[in-house]
Image: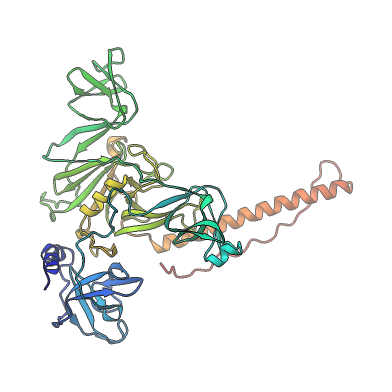
């Protein structure tokens, strides 16, 4: 076995046993002379067992190279047409029809490489105007035959620029857009958090949340203002006092600040889903504490804090409190409004995504720099640098070419613990929502309710138009003053039929 494969194996076998402890159960592997393979499909599914149906562990893009640890025959013809399956490192199986032998092993790079000197993995652009046309093919662009229109502010991952009949265009996964209709995005915020060493329960430090925040000589509004601090200046938390309705925090000798001017970081004990009833850790489990009240995040392994930073949680749609094991880890994805939402939005290439509850996720946000304040649609926004750190720290590390991973057990998944310290003591933590991916039945109910609501709104608008037209016509014919014409409302369309959600 080549050196790169030996390194890969040595670094991933332990993680594989933790992630998939029964990966070898019920399966006998045959030796093979094939050391490496590469995937040949646009999206290849890696499964937990060499048969279908069995849950998917990960998704891989075309050309992803893998180290092989053996083969096993198909148990039937349904999944791999009777062809053998490859068992690969660090875990999982894929049908041999979906791969070809490769001369080289997998690279050591992580799932989503970032070019040197950049913070983001893609080039981004934003739509300038409402109703911007997008074209599926170059021929459609030449014929001015758009496939759809885009909303102002939508973002696109730009794959290339080109000219069509002399007109500059950009090409994205969604199609072709005239270059004049977009503005280029930059590299996102350069904000990043800090590593933490040692353990100190309770208040630890804070970042200044407002520009030119005043520092007082005493915990009182009438004391002398001795300095002003820039936004995101980091200060220690040494003591606190309550003076009337104002909570004051001491950041140095005769240096006090209002708590409302700070994003505080508090080191907390592990939640119940990380330790058992005796206080013993279920495993050296990774978990992330998100404080909605302070807009801060602390990443832990067991009781040891590792990293802290600022976030932006939900504003118009509150981020749910609760304990949520990560249900999917995705290198990059498009986030868009659901069918039942009336305000359309689309954000392509959202990087470093940890989905933890329904459609909610921790992820990188390249479109704003408001970390430390509520800003999102319900997710937990992180700066690009912080999102990459959290994604790569949260196990397992995804090799190059792996686009997503789905933990099979909540006990092996990073736990997202979300609380709100700004609430009253008994309301700071509760389980607002169920764990896991979106519930298909609930999603169906929301879609049908939205369809009914929109049909009713359309009917009301239609009736209003008829009423106005009828009133004008009847008035000209001498309708008695004070009377209104009779308009029969058209029947509402029937409810949508119940169908299986294809997922």
Instruction: Return the residue found at the far right.
Output: 478
Q: Measured along the vertical axis of the image, is residue 266 above or below residue 456?
A: above
**Front residue (pair 428, 398):** 398
Q: Measured along the vertical axis of the image, is residue 453 above or below residue 71?
A: above
Instruction: Return the residue found at the far front.
Output: 166
Residue 41's image quarter?
Answer: bottom left
Residue 198 percent location from the top left of the image: 11, 39
Residue 468 percent location from the top left of the image: 76, 48
Residue 226's image quarter?
Answer: top left
Residue 82 percent location from the top left of the image: 28, 87
Q: In the picture provided, is 352 more to the left or to the right than 497?
A: left
Q: Where does the C terminus fall, quadrant-wise? A: bottom left
Q: Where does the N terminus fall, quadrant-wise? A: bottom left
**Front residue (pair 372, 389):** 389
Seen at 27% across and 69% down, the residue is 64
Q: Measured along the vertical axis of the image, is residue 316 above or below residue 487?
A: above
Seen at 37% across and 47% down, the residue is 366
**Front residue (pair 281, 432):** 281
Q: In the picture provided, is 262 more to the left or to the right than 23?
A: right
């Amino acid at each position: 076995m080549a050196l790169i494969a030996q390194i890969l194996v040595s670094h991933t076998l332990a993680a594989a046993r933790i992630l998939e402890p029964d990966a070898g159960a019920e399966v006998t592997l045959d030796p093979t002379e094939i050391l490496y393979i590469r995937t040949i499909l646009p999206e290849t599914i890696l499964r937990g067992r060499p048969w279908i149906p069995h849950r998917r562990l990960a998704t891989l893009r075309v050309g992803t190279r893998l180290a092989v640890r053996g083969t096993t025959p198909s148990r039937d013809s349904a999944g791999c047409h009777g062809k053998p399956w490859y068992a690969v490192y660090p875990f999982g199986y894929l049908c041999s029809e979906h791969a070809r032998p490769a001369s080289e092993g997998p690279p050591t790079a992580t799932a989503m490489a970032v070019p040197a000197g950049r913070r983001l993995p893609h080039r981004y652009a934003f739509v300038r105007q409402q109703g911007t046309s997008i074209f599926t093919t170059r021929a459609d662009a030449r014929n001015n035959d758009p496939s759809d229109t885009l909303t102002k502010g939508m973002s696109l991952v730009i794959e290339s620029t080109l000219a069509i009949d002399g007109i500059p265009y950009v090409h994205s996964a969604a199609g072709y857009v005239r270059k004049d209709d977009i503005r280029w995005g930059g590299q996102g915020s350069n904000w990043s958090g800090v590593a933490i060493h040692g353990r100190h329960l309770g208040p630890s430090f804070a970042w200044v949340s407002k520009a030119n925040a005043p520092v007082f000589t005493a915990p009182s509004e009438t004391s002398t203002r001795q300095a002003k601090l820039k936004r995101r200046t980091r200060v220690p938390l040494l003591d606190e006092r309550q003076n009337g309705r104002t909570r004051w925090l001491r950041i140095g000798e005769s240096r006090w600040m209002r708590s409302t001017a700070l994003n505080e970081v508090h080191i907390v004990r592990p939640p119940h889903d990380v330790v058992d009833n005796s206080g013993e850790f279920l495993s050296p489990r990774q978990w992330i504490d998100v404080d909605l009240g302070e807009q801060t995040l602390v990443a832990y392994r067991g009781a040891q804090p590792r990293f802290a930073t600022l976030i932006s949680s939900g504003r118009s749609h509150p981020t749910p409190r609760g304990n949520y094991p990560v249900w999917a880890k995705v290198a990059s994805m498009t986030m868009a409004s659901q069918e039942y939402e009336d305000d359309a939005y689309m954000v392509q290439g959202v990087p470093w995504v940890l989905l933890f509850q329904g459609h909610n996720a921790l992820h990188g946000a390249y479109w704003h720099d408001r970390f430390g304040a509520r800003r999102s649609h319900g997710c937990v926004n992180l700066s690009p640098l912080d999102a990459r750190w959290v994604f790569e720290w949260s196990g397992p590390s995804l090799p190059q070419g792996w686009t997503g991973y789905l933990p099979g057990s909540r006990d092996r998944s990073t736990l997202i613990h979300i609380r709100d310290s700004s609430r009253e003591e008994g309301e700071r933590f509760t389980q607002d929502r169920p764990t896991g991916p979106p519930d298909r039945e609930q999603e169906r109910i929301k879609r049908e309710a939205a369809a009914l609501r929109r049909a009713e709104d359309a009917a009301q608008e239609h009736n209003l138009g008829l009423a106005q037209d009828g009133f004008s016509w009847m008035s000209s014919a001498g309708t008695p003053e004070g009377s209104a014409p009779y308009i029969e409302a058209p029947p509402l369309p029937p409810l949508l039929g119940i169908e299986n959600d294809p997922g």
